[in-house]
Image: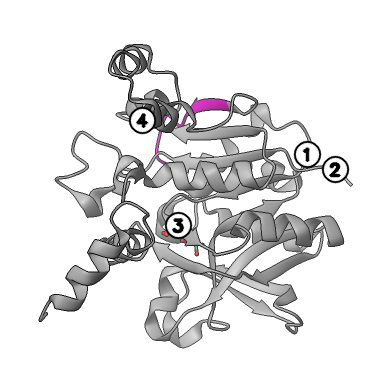
Amino acid sequence: MQKITKVVIPAAGFGTRFLPATKANPKEMLPIVDKPVIQYAAEEAVAAGIKDIIFIIGRNKQSIEDHFDKAYELEAELAAKQKTLLIDSVQAIVPSFVNCIFIRQPTALGLGHAIHCARPVISNEPFAIILPDDLIDSDSCGCLSQMMDIYNQTGKSVLAVERVKGPEISKYGVIEIENFEDRLGKIKTIVEKPPFESAPSDLGVVGRYILSYKVMEILGRLPPGSGGEIQLTDGISELLKLEDINAFEFYGTRFDCGSKLGFLKANIALGTKSGEVGESLISWIKEQKF
Ligand code: G1P
């Protein structure tokens, strides 16, 4: 079985839901407590044993590259002031043995197209995908690490899913499953953003995937689907015709940081766990008469 060492993190979207905050700053750089949202994705990948992080970026995303690069002047300034803890926090964004690779998606043709842009650096091997908007907080092992365990046991592609209540399901890729045992099941069908009335189940795909390389070949020849975009979900649906794919209901709490409400919830939930401000934040929340 081939080991998974590469993750693709697409970060090319415009972030229109957060305008004007995202007029000049990428949405992936908005902070959850004290780290940009994309750093949580990178940390989850590193914790899962990933060695190469492939960021798919677009125009105006320079600050993402800078964030994962060395900041000489800042480090020198902090060193002069002997701010050791702060130096550590800027140096340890990802460990030195992890490669950060940046690829430009020239035109925003959809998530499937963004993933396909990573094809030149993924050489016929299975790979992972993390959508940084989906921040998954888990007390024990990260969502991608949980999925790596499943992949290592089965050798098959695996998607993370969660139950979604009511009409919200029409915002997701939705799966139909044969049966779930220990949170794991074989996918029968998958469809992108179906109407609530015809959704095949309440199991929505969240932004974590481990996929066989064949999906790259499929994405390269897919026509546009839902919303006129080349959809990753359509590629996975084609892959299903060739091989089994599992769905895994992960352990943890997911925050949709691509929405204002999810973003605020993530800041509050992770803020309450922060060693620096957690206790004060909890006391302040308790005092409020919202
Ligand atoms: C994307 C995928 C969708 C998935 C969702 C998870 O949609 O296309 O299948 O369920 O991420 O967050 P987006 O949220 O980019 O519209």
Can you give x and y, in whole percent of width and height, for residue 37 in the image? Answer: 38, 47
Q: Which residues are magenta?
A: 100-108
Q: Is residue 164 magenta-colored?
A: no
Which residue corresponds to mark 4? 86
Q: Secondary structure at mark 1?
A: loop
Spot occupied by residue 66 in the image (x, y as percentages of width and height): 38, 23
Task: Count numbered badges in the picture.
Answer: 4
Which-is-in-front pick, marks 3 and 4?
Answer: 4
> Which amino acid type is shown beneath numbered disc 3?
Leu
Under tag 4, what secondary structure? helix
- Upstream in sequence: badge 1 or badge 2: 2
Which residue, given by chain and number where applicable, does mark 1 sit on?
Answer: 125
Contact check, label 1 and label 2, Cβ < 8 Å: yes
Q: Earlier in the sequence, mark 2 or mark 4?
A: 2
Residue beneath disc 2? 2
Indicate the secondary structure of the residue bearing disc 3. strand
Q: Tell me the distance, in whole angstroms, between the alpha carbons under discs 2 and 4.
A: 38 Å
Q: Nearer the viewer, mark 4 or mark 1?
A: 4
Q: Amino acid at mark 2?
A: Gln
Indicate left or right for 227 with 17 as reference: right
What is the C-alpha distance between the residues marked 2 and 3? Answer: 27 Å
Q: Locate the C terminus by quadrant.
A: bottom left
Q: CA distance from mark 4 to mark 1?
A: 38 Å
Q: Could you say which disc has been placed on residue 135 in the image?
A: 3
- Confirm or reject: label 4 Cβ below 8 Å from ligand 1: no
Q: Amino acid at mark 1?
A: Glu
